[in-house]
């Protein structure tokens, strides 16, 4: 027996991160059996989001408008930019810190082996913004992977060539953890970034 649309739904759900065949099948059957109204709403919202959510013209964060909520917020410091790799990083910084500048979203990191270069990350747009002279301070909050650090070095060069101050978020031992369980790279970075106590 061929369940064409059911199989198509299961296959479509597999595009979500971490969703394998069994999880996709479970979701599809749940929606069909127990929540058809929710499934219809999900389908409608997803269609509208795919049609209307774009990148902010200034920072590349997802928005329905030409400029996002962070770029239009006049209470935020337009002279400060925090560069992040993923949209979730913006939300984490907003939730956990007192940062009141603006953002720039890379949507990835440099990876020549995968064919990801500066233009793929919008670094031409960031360079144009740096050229205006409006940005005075740039904070690098890229991931600690090899690619993330290579991306940070590239951006640091762009900024320092234009006399923009560059800060990097501190890396090291998480609060509440014990030194004996820290890996050697984390411990090394923590010691490199040690500072005087008051």
Image (spheres, rainbow, N blue to C red):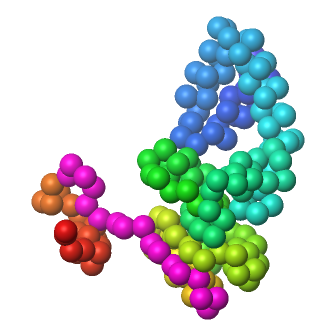
Tell which of 64 and 179 is nearer to you.
Answer: 64
- Residue at 79%, 54% (x, y): give it: 67
Residue 158 rendering spot, x and y as whole percentages = 62, 85
Please identify the quarter of the rendering in which residue 182 is found: bottom left
- Residue at 53%, 81% (x, y): give it: 165
Q: Is residue 172 above or below residue 23?
A: below
Residue 101 rendering spot, x and y as whole percentages = 58, 61
Image quadrant for the N terminus? top right
Left-right relation of 110 to 53: left
Is residue 163 on the magenta stretch? Answer: yes
Q: Is residue 198 visible?
A: yes
Is residue 164 on the magenta stretch? Answer: yes
Left-right relation of 78 to 19: right
Image quadrant for the C terminus? bottom left
Tell which of 82 and 78 is nearer to you.
Answer: 78
- Residue at 73%, 19% (x, y): give it: 39
Residues rendered magenta in the picture? 161-177
The residue furthest bottom is: 161
Please identify the quarter of the rendering in which residue 134 is found: bottom right
Please identify the quarter of the rendering in which residue 25 is found: top right
């Amino acid at each position: 027996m061929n369940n064409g649309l059911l199989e198509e739904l299961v296959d479509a759900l597999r595009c979500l991160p971490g969703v394998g065949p069994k999880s996709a099948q479970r979701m599809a059957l749940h929606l069909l059996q127990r929540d058809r109204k929710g499934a219809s709403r999900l389908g409608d919202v997803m269609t509208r989001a795919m049609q209307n959510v774009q990148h902010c013209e200034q920072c590349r964060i997802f928005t329905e408008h030409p400029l996002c909520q962070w770029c239009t917020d006049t209470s935020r410091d337009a002279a400060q930019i925090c560069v992040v790799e993923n949209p979730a990083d913006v939300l984490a910084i907003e939730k956990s810190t007192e940062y009141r500048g603006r953002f720039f979203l890379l949507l990835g990191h440099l990876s020549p082996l995968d064919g990801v270069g500066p233009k793929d990350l919008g670094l031409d747009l960031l360079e144009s913004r740096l050229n205006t002279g409006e940005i005075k301070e740039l904070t690098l909050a890229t991931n600690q992977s090899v690619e993330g650090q290579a991306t940070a070095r590239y951006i640091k060069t762009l900024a320092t060539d234009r006399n923009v101050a560059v800060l990097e978020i501190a890396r090291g031992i998480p609060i509440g953890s014990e030194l004996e369980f820290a890996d050697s790279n984390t411990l090394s970075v923590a010691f490199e970034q040690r500072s005087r106590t008051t």
